[in-house]
Image (cartoon, coloured by chain):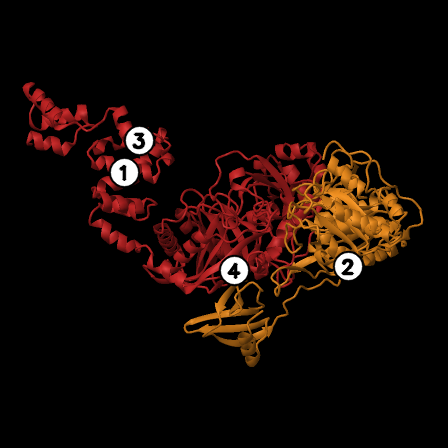
């Protein structure tokens, strides 16, 4: 934003952002378009986009500004092309929720922001012509802002599409919390009959090198052609634009801040390799197949669940906050095999776990190691935790345990029933066997 | 004629512009590769850039080679850029001041769309640092419109079968782009302007040197012609030729335009693309035979009333037919085209084949025809491109980007990019330039080349003076001369001639850093050896860079001869009946590396 001083002056002169202007300071003359100010820039410097396309910043003081030409709306032109359906092409539903996959440069915040309509994505990836596409814009949001309420909305929208003619459903989503959403959808959509595929991008689609084009294409192939009637996540399989992996929605996590192949399957093999030309190589044969089953929506969630990370020196009093606020369940991201501070009285979480369990509040144990499973008996301290009532969640990812506990608590508050459900495989989140290779 | 040039000069910073990788091309072998594809996207103002769309239409794959010291996730487009390199920014400001430019108040880093694959991100990061400058030339002032600081592109390794391999060590090296106004008078003047800017860049001592570190692009148009950007002239010597040939080419294209207007009442109809593969089943043309063996096709089309025009020479050794061929090469990736204004025997196509094609495409005497060989869909794309170029001939010269050929000629590369290709790089916040910083840099500006020349011609011969003025060793030269008070001629000869000839004979002189050279001159000042020994010592040290100068001198047994020993030798020679000049010459012949000629002649008294 420009400073108040500049805004007032511009208003007085009748000059708006997007106007063609001539700017003078003594001998110096600049002509171009007055641009919006990035939040990170100096608010007392105006930005002019010169005729050669470059922008420069000029200190406002001592400048004369004059409007010389037409106003240009600085915004992306959305495509209004209607997609025709043709017989013989596989049909596909695309639900857009925002994120980098659908993002553009935003001048006010100085960052990338969601502003693409699904039709623009179709226009951007000509290969999508091979599908009959129905697209819906559900949200335009970055995934760090998603809440359990949004998961419900997405589940409803997907459910509606599953009832329709489409061979599969693709949901475009911000990458940061995409694996929370895939977990939530995995628990909410019961008896899946078709593939539900989430995809996103690590590089925004305003740039030619964006991974969004190939991710979207591979997601479309996987949704329409694969036999995997599960919630999956399709993203780049390597740093190259060669193939994507389809990961099971409850066994995947973002493991890199910025790389294209940030998502990895954890404690499970990826479901398949998907190539942009449509070829699909199944890797993990253990999956739910397409069928005529009657899909149902079970979107109840108990939202008062907390995810707590253990670290050396943490204050056990953090539990008091959640208990006072009437939280109904707690997931702990323990160290190693699922440890929490145990022996030193001042730091021990054992009394807190006991207190919660006694109050009927389940405490679930996962590991911040991400890879591998937790174990309740290997060390004495683990046994103390177990005796205090903690539920050890096998090879379940912390984020998945968090989502699952919300789902489970919405169906029962009975501690024993909760324990049983948490340890029962509902949607591929628990594996008996840990794969040898990551 | 209107002409302006753009000079691209790599800066000699330690690190790259937006990451901490080393900013020098790697000597190592690549350790891996990633493969990417790029897509044309809309620019900031919602328009897809024409040049970007052109590259996308070629649908190519790009391979990127990884070099550990000079590649991180930033070059791979797997991590956002880091902060802009301050060292590079300050050098760019210095260059702005040397070129009399105004430094902007706030630098806005932009993304310039490039999808020829030369940047992994699909854009080049670039920012204007200075505007409105000028340089003085023998024919008056020439304006310097903009000075940009930008990322060097990735270096091309090879191109084949629709995929290009690039090396990532070069990507991201800081570069300044200096664009002059279209105020250059003629070809000779263009060369002067390029040389002048090159000299100013070099006197900073902060720019990279050697092959590929400086490149010129040239913008040229003639009245009624079109603005053409010629890319990538690496040799100054070519600039004049490029301009002369381009002017000639545009004039000829205007002539062809006039001729076409005379021949055509209406517009050129799009001809049918005819599959003539069957006519070449028994051909004696080797490359067509080979293509047919691989299952490829031969397609042909008529160009109505174009007979004679395709053979029209635009400039020496370049015909209009080649312009059509360039389009087919650039847009479809074929090797070239064959057309009816050529002598087809040279391809091994006989008269019967020619007649058969002519009759198949229904070309009359006044018509031309074009043949392409390759996969059928590629051939169709190629003929489409040829037709497109033929149509444009009715308009005269085209606005386009062309690449330099070794003889100073040019070939079509791609359409001229528009301003839609630039949009803000939001990963890098705008950088405010404080006046104090600019003033600090202004105070430390190097002298102008003229000031240096004036100073040096008093103490050096003109040839040596010219060399040292633009030398990267200039600052070392000054330091040695001023601090050690050594004869400037000895220092300049060593730095500019001895090192060069040692490099030519293959000695690894890059091992001789500033400290080593300083050590050499300190020992010389102390009288440890004579100046004739310097090449021997440097040759040895370049191969043994960890040894000291004094150790090298001892090892080579070339210590300066002491007065007593010298006197003894002189006495001995005198006894043998030698005297005067003969005596001196004989001693110098035998002890050249150990005896100072001045000292000897004083001793002999000749």
Q: Give SS at disc 1.
A: helix
The extreme bottom residue here reads A12
- Left or right of B354: which side holds B580? left
Look at chain B in the picture and name its colour.
red
Look at chain A in the picture and name its colour.
orange
Q: Please tell me the numbered disc located at residue B208.
A: none
Q: Give SS at disc 4.
A: loop
Q: Position of residue B103 (x, y in %)?
A: 43, 63
Name the N-terminal-most of marks 1 and 4.
4
- Res A83 visible: no
Q: Please tell me the numbered disc located at residue B494.
A: 1
- Res B581 visible: yes
- Circle 3 sits on which residue? B548
Image vertical order of residue B396 relative to residue B601, above or below: below
Q: Give SS at disc 3.
A: loop
Residue at screen point 65% across, 37% down: B352
Quarter that holds the N terminus of chain B: bottom left
- Circle 2 sits on which residue? A325
Which of the 4 quarters of the picture holds residue B141?
bottom left
- Circle 4 sits on which residue? B226
Q: Determine contact: label 4, label 3, CB under 8 Å.
A: no
């Amino acid at each position: 934003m420009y400073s108040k001083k500049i805004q007032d002056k511009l208003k007085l002169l009748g000059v708006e952002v997007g106007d063609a202007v001539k700017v003078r300071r003594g001998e110096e003359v600049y002509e171009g378009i007055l641009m919006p100010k990035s939040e990170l820039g100096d608010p007392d410097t105006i930005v002019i986009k010169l005729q050669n396309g470059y922008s420069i910043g000029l200190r406002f003081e001592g400048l004369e500004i004059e409007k010389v030409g037409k106003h240009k709306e600085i915004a992306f032109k959305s495509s209004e092309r209607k997609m025709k359906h043709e017989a013989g092409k596989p049909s596909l539903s695309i639900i857009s929720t925002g994120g980098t996959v659908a993002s553009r440069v935003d001048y006010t915040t100085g960052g990338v922001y969601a502003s693409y309509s699904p039709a623009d994505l179709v226009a951007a990836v000509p290969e999508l012509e091979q599908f009959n596409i129905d697209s819906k814009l559900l949200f335009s949001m970055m995934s760090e802002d998603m809440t359990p309420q949004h998961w419900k909305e997405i589940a409803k929208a997907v459910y509606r599409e599953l009832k329709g003619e489409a061979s599969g459903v693709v949901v475009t989503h911000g990458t940061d919390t995409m694996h929370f959403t895939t977990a939530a959808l995995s628990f909410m959509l019961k008896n899946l009959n078709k593939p539900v595929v989430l995809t996103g991008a690590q590089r925004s689609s305003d740039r030619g090198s964006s991974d969004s084009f190939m991710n979207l294409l591979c997601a479309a192939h996987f949704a329409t052609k694969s036999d995997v009637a599960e919630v999956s996540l399709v993203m780049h399989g390597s740093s190259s634009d060669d193939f994507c992996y389809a990961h099971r929605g409850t066994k995947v996590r973002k493991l890199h801040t910025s790389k294209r192949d940030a998502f990895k399957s954890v404690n499970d093999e990826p479901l398949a390799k998907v190539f942009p030309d449509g070829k699909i190589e199944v890797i993990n044969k253990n999956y739910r197949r397409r069928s005529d089953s009657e899909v149902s929506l079970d979107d109840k969630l108990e939202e008062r669940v907390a995810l707590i990370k253990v670290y050396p020196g943490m204050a056990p009093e953090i539990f008091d906050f959640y208990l006072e606020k009437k939280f109904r369940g707690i997931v702990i991201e323990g160290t190693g095999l699922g440890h929490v501070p145990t022996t030193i009285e001042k730091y021990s979480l054992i009394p807190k776990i006991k207190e919660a369990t006694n109050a009927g509040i389940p405490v679930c144990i996962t590991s911040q190691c991400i890879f591998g499973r937790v174990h309740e008996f290997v060390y004495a301290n683990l046994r103390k935790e177990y005796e205090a009532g903690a539920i050890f969640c096998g090879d379940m990812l912390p984020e998945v345990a968090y989502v699952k506990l919300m789902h489970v608590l919405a169906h029962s508050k009975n501690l024993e029933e909760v324990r049983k459900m948490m340890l029962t495989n509902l949607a591929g989140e628990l594996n008996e066997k840990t794969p040898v290779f990551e | 004629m209107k002409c302006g040039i753009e000079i691209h000069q790599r800066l000699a910073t330690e690190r790259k512009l937006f990451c901490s990788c080393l900013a020098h091309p790697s000597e190592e072998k690549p350790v891996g590769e990633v493969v990417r594809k790029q897509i044309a996207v809309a620019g900031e103002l919602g328009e897809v850039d024409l040049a970007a769309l052109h590259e996308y239409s070629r649908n190519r794959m790009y391979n990127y080679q990884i070099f550990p010291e000079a590649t991180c996730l930033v070059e791979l487009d797997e991590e956002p850029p880091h902060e802009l390199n301050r060292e590079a920014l300050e050098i760019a400001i210095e260059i702005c001041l040397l070129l009399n430019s105004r430094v902007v108040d706030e630098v806005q880093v932009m993304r310039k769309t490039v999808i020829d694959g030369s940047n992994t991100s699909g854009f080049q990061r670039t920012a204007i640092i200075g505007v409105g400058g000028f340089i003085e030339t023998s024919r008056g002032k020439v304006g310097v419109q903009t000075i940009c600081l930008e990322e060097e592109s990735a270096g091309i390794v090879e191109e084949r079968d629709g995929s290009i391999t690039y090396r990532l060590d070069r990507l991201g090296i800081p570069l300044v782009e200096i664009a002059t106004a279209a105020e250059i008078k003629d070809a000779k003047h263009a060369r002067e302007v390029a040389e002048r800017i090159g000299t100013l860049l070099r006197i900073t001592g902060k720019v990279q040197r050697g092959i590929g570190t400086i490149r010129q692009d040239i913008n040229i148009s003639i009245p009624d012609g079109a603005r053409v950007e010629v890319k990538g002239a690496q040799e100054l010597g070519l600039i004049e030729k490029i301009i002369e040939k381009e002017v000639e080419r545009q004039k000829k294209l205007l002539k062809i335009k006039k001729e076409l207007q005379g021949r055509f009442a209406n517009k050129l109809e799009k001809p049918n693309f005819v599959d003539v593969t069957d006519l070449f089943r028994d051909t004696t043309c080797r490359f067509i035979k080979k293509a047919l063996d691989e299952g490829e096709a031969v397609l042909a089309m008529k160009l109505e009333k174009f007979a004679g025009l395709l053979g029209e020479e635009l400039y020496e050794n370049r015909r209009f037919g080649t312009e059509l061929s360039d389009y087919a090469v650039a847009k479809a990736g074929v090797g070239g085209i064959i057309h009816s204004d050529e002598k087809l025997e040279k391809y091994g196509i006989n008269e019967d084949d020619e007649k058969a094609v002519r009759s198949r495409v229904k070309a009359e005497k006044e018509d031309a025809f074009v043949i392409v060989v390759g996969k059928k869909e590629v051939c169709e794309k190629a003929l489409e491109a040829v037709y497109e170029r033929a149509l444009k001939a009715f308009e005269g010269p085209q606005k386009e980007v062309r690449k330099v050929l070794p003889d100073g000629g040019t070939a079509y590369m791609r359409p001229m990019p528009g301003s839609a290709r630039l949009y803000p790089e939001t990963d890098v916040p705008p950088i405010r330039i404080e006046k104090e910083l600019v003033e600090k840099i202004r105070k430390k500006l190097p002298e102008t080349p003229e000031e240096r020349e004036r100073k040096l011609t008093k103490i050096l011969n003109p040839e040596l003076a010219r060399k040292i003025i633009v030398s990267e060793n200039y600052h070392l030269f000054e330091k040695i001369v001023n601090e050690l008070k050594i004869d400037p001629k000895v220092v300049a000869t060593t730095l500019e001639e001895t090192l060069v000839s040692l490099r030519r004979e293959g000695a690894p002189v890059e091992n001789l850093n500033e400290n080593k050279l300083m050590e050499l001159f300190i020992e010389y000042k102390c009288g440890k050896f004579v100046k004739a020994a310097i090449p021997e010592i440097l040759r040895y040290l370049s191969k043994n860079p960890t040894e000291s100068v004094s150790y090298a001198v001892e090892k080579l047994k070339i210590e300066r001869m002491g007065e007593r020993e010298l006197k003894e030798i002189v006495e001995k020679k005198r006894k043998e009946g030698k005297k005067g000049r003969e005596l001196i010459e004989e001693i110098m012949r035998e002890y050249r590396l150990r005896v100072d000629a001045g000292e000897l002649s004083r001793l002999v008294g000749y």
